Image (cartoon, rainbow, N blue to C red):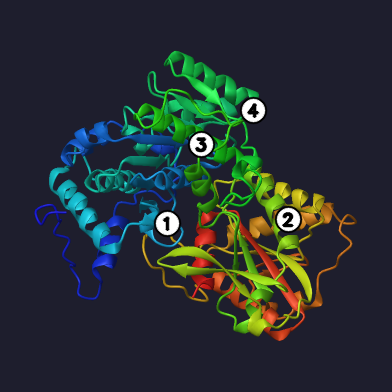
Amino acid sequence: MSDQEVGKGSPKSSSLSPYEEAMEALSSLITRRTRADASNVGDQFDLLFDYLKMLDLEEPIANMKVIHVAGTKGKGSTCTFTESILRNCGFRTGLFTSPHLIDIRERFRLDGKEICEEKFLAYFWWCYDRLKEKTDDNIPMPTYFRFLALLGFKIFAAEQVDVAILEVGLGGKYDATNVVQAPIVCGITSLGYDHMEILGNTLGEIAGEKAGIFKNGIPAFTVPQPEEAMHVLEEKASQLNVPLQVVTPLDAKLLNGSSLGLEGEHQYVNAALAIALCFTWLKRTGHVGDIYLEQTENLPEQFIKGLTSASLQGRAQIVPDQHLKGERSNRLVFFLDGAHSPESMQVCARWFSLAIKEYNPDQTLFHQQLDNSKFSHEVVKTHNGERVSQGKSTPILLFNCLTVRDPQLLLPHLMKTCADNGVYFKKALFVPSLSVFNKVGPQVFTLTDPKVDLSWQFNLQRVWENLMQSSKGKNTDIVSEELKDDMETSASNCEHSAVFPSLPLAIKWLRDRVQQNQSLRLQVLVTGSLHLVGDVLNLVKK
């Protein structure tokens, strides 16, 4: 990046680092309490084209070789597989996803790695300063997500990526990523009920919003969908002369004995969609012949490597508590999945039920260690080569969700699917989010906040306790005595659940349990919100 291109961005306060200064500026663009605000449906969408002019991005975007992906579930996984495949094919990749779990730079990946801080700051201030200078009362500064999408386009254009893979943030038709007028190929992942307050109350309405990324004559792929949703997708495709194809789940045999890099049966559907997107991209950009490779044939070696090496934080991720010393770390293990829709809750519950049975720290520990804000996988022997006292595994639920979600839909799916697989939670812990809606960047984690509003967590607890009461008799296990101790730090303790006023307090309570009882092994499912998953990762990593 030339000196002329680098924005000013000099910190206004000596107490803030340059990165913190950028996060303060970014936070100033957050105008709504939640992303899921009904007023952001098409809210002055055309302003985005004004911003593109201000940033001289019209021509770069027109020349960008984009893969655009929308959907309810599996967007991030599909984009991750797609990026990994094309990177392994030798292309320079740019990947834009949301949300981030720990650091905003996770949203912008170049060749599979999040953008470095130096480049991020240079591109951030270049965009921010230029927009600040050119916007006015008629064309105000872009809102938070729109700015991030514009920043992503600037990064990918300046870094001259061969392919830009864009994950839609919300919906499709009015999403900031939808300023792309001529993508190479589009994908629609599994559709379900989410953000109904914005996208509509039926699968048909939701499908219509997602199909908003279809462009005239541009090929698109989707996965098997409910009939109502598929009908709308086909109708929208027909109106725009879009050749729409439905992929079938990937046959595991095509991986030649290897496994997908992302855990869970549902990932075979996402992988199949990624394969279709990649082959079509290669074909339409002149990199392969004219026939689409059928799945009955062998997959290219680069595709297999891409699929098996893909990694994504916060989805079906297993992390032993790295703050507990030695052998204790595998007696408190977090199973993290950012599921937040009824359908994804079922998928998450199936994964957790299988994972806790397969996770056997007596033989090897699957440690995930932080490396440059990205978890890498490392298999290590048990502590000092000795057998770790296994004890009895105790499943715990650590849960929170946005207030726009319906816990009456989420929690029953989670509980029933786990019970169907013989897994019963001994205690459910409900906590408020650590991440605040109006601030980006490092959070100060305190054990207690006297001003915290726990009314939503009490509501979640009531739903859970009612579910437990109605399922009595089906679960013969009683709550462990060890889980009844030291509950004075909780705001509300019931027979099967507790509300903690903060996540750090809940984590401390869990750590205290395993430190005070050598035979106790806690397997904690963290779900309901990707924000919660990110906060937990922040607290349990070293």
Horizontal side of 482 relative to 127 (left or right) equals: right
Identify the element where label 2 is drawn: helix
* Above or below, comparing residue 14 to residue 197 in the picture: below
Q: Which residue bears the numbered disc 4?
A: 226
Instruction: Say which residue appears at 63% left-offset and 43% top-offset.
Output: 266
Closest to the camera, between mark 4 and mark 1, is 4
Identify the element where label 4 is drawn: loop
As shown in the figure, which amino acid type bears the numbered disc 1? Answer: Phe
For residue 275, the mark is 3
The CA distance from mark 3 to mark 4 is 22 Å
Q: Which residue bears the numbered disc 1?
A: 437
- Asked whether disc 3 touches disc 4, contact meaning CB atoms under 8 Å apart, the reply is no
Answer few, some or many: residues within 10 Å of disc 1's Cα (few below 14, many 20 plus, some between 14 and 19): some
The CA distance from mark 1 to mark 3 is 36 Å
The CA distance from mark 2 to mark 4 is 26 Å
Identify the element where label 3 is drawn: helix
The CA distance from mark 3 to mark 2 is 26 Å
User: Tag 3 or tag 1, which sits nearer the N-term?
Assistant: 3
Q: Which residue bears the numbered disc 2?
A: 354
As shown in the figure, which amino acid type bears the numbered disc 4? Answer: Pro
User: Tag 4 or tag 3, which sits nearer the N-term?
Assistant: 4
- Image quadrant for the N terminus? bottom left
Horizontal side of 343 relative to 174 (left or right) equals: right
Instruction: Say which residue appears at 59% left-offset and 84% top-offset.
Output: 325
The CA distance from mark 4 to mark 1 is 33 Å
